[in-house]
Image (tube, rainbow, N blue to C red):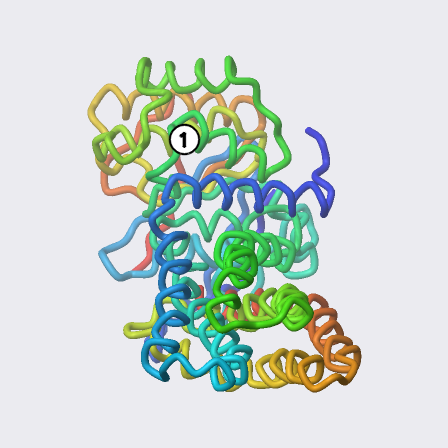
Amino acid sequence: MKELTLFGMLKLVVQRDMTLAMRRRADVLTTLIFFVMVVSLFPLGVGPEMEMLRKIAPGVLWVAALLASMLSLGRLFSADHQDGTLEQLMLTPQPLAVVVLGKIIAHWMVSGLPLVLIAPVLGIQFDMRMETLGILILGLLLGTPVLSMIGGIGAALTLGLRGGGVLLSLLVLPLCIPILIFGTAAVDAVASGLSPVSHLSLLGALLVLALTFAPWVAAQALRISME
Amino acid sequence: MLEVSNLACSRGDQRLFSGLSFVLHPGQIMQVQGENGSGKTTLLRTLCGFVSADEGYVAWNGAQVASLGDAFHAQILYLGHLNAIKDDLSALENLKISAAFSGITLQDATVKSALRRLGLKGRELLPCKVLSQGQRRRVALARLLVSDARLWILDEPLAALDVRAVALIQELIAEHLSSGGMAIFTTHQPLQIDSMTVRTLALS
């Protein structure tokens, strides 16, 4: 028997969840289409004033990304919980936090990363300039993994609860406010000719903080939910 | 060696059992009996560490399981009420993935021969959602063949199985015991293991 390294375990979990996600592509697409639709509703509702659209663009894109990431959070652990595979994942000879981190990474790759990739196209709808678009993407790239991590804690806490989906959003959305603030502020800073570095650094710091603590906290929450 | 000492568990406010003590040596098997709701599943889940005991402890080779942590997980194989197989994956993929999580890399041929032994020849590559309930249970039970865990914790392993499959499971358990393994299980059906005495533990 070969010893599984921590990294080997992480890779296994990510691979497994990616394979499962590819078998259920509809779930991945719903998140993406929801994001595109919510963002596209704003120019239609607000009207085609360029100045106005350019101003609200970062906020709209960020809020839409936040809401879209809530959509798929409920499934993060519940699918594995329902068919019993979560129990088996808890019985692996590696710390549960590693399994949780792997699941969160896979979740981000199928629900966060596609949003980041399509955001530039949507930004053009709002007549965003190149440099602001670049900072928006960079901000989303740093911020959406944090959304998945915080969401992971919420998903673990609400596992198995009836109506857990709504409760999950109520729990997680307030905690995501700092990411929203720094993400939009970075874009606003560039638009008004200031440096976005401080805001992006804070987003990066949040990402490091979440990477360090969120998997461990979510693992503890899972243990409580499984009792 | 599995040692349970003075174990007490409750579900909500209700005390299910208390003062439960037993020792399981290599090559021994124990059947947990009791009515519905008497705490059989809770006992097995406590052994796995999913549920924390109110009193008492579980020890493995003299060391308390709580202090062994994840290292203990490599020694056990748990099969619960749920089959723990993914509907979107094939039987082959399911088995390979669950073995990989316990650190065993399996060749396709090994997995196929395990599945064949459980009567799933020709079904290896079908997604598990098209299999019948009994066939899915067989996929779950195929894990017994490819695992090197010392202690098998089986919750109703015979549910949804036909007579031939039950005989096969008895054969598998006998092989496991004769190679120094241990097993603890719950079932409402009588289980005959060749040349072995099945100890029973009655919960009330």
Residue B40 placed where, x, y %?
35, 55
Q: Nearer the viewer, residue A151 or A108?
A: A108
Q: Is residue B47 above or below residue B158?
A: below
Asked if residue B157 lies left or right of residue A50, the reply is left
Residue A78 lies, with reference to residue B144, above or below; the image says below
Instruction: Give the quadrant of the N terminus of chain B.
Output: top right
In the visual, does A130 lie left or right of B193?
Answer: right
**Which of the 4 quarters of the picture holds residue A184?**
bottom right
Residue at the image point whose x is 29% and y is 42% from the top: B187
Residue B21 appearing in the image:
no
Q: Nearer the viewer, residue B73 or B133?
A: B133
- The image quarter in which residue A22 lies: top left
- Picture layout, residue A131 above or below residue B120: below
Classify residue A197 by image quadrant.
bottom right
A41, A162: nearer the viewer = A41
- Residue at point 71% right, 31% down? A2
Classify the position of the C terminus of chain B by image quarter.
bottom left
Point out residue A35 in the picture as x, y percentages from the top left corner.
Answer: 41, 66
* Residue B204 visible in the snapshot: yes
Task: Identify which residue, B165 or B167, lies in the foreground.
Answer: B165
Q: Residue at x 41, y 52 (%)?
A: A28
The image position of residue A66, as x and y in percent, is: 48, 74
Identify residue type, mark 1: Thr
Read off the residue under disc 1: B197
Q: Chain of mark 1?
A: B
Indicate left or right for A70 with A194 as reference: left
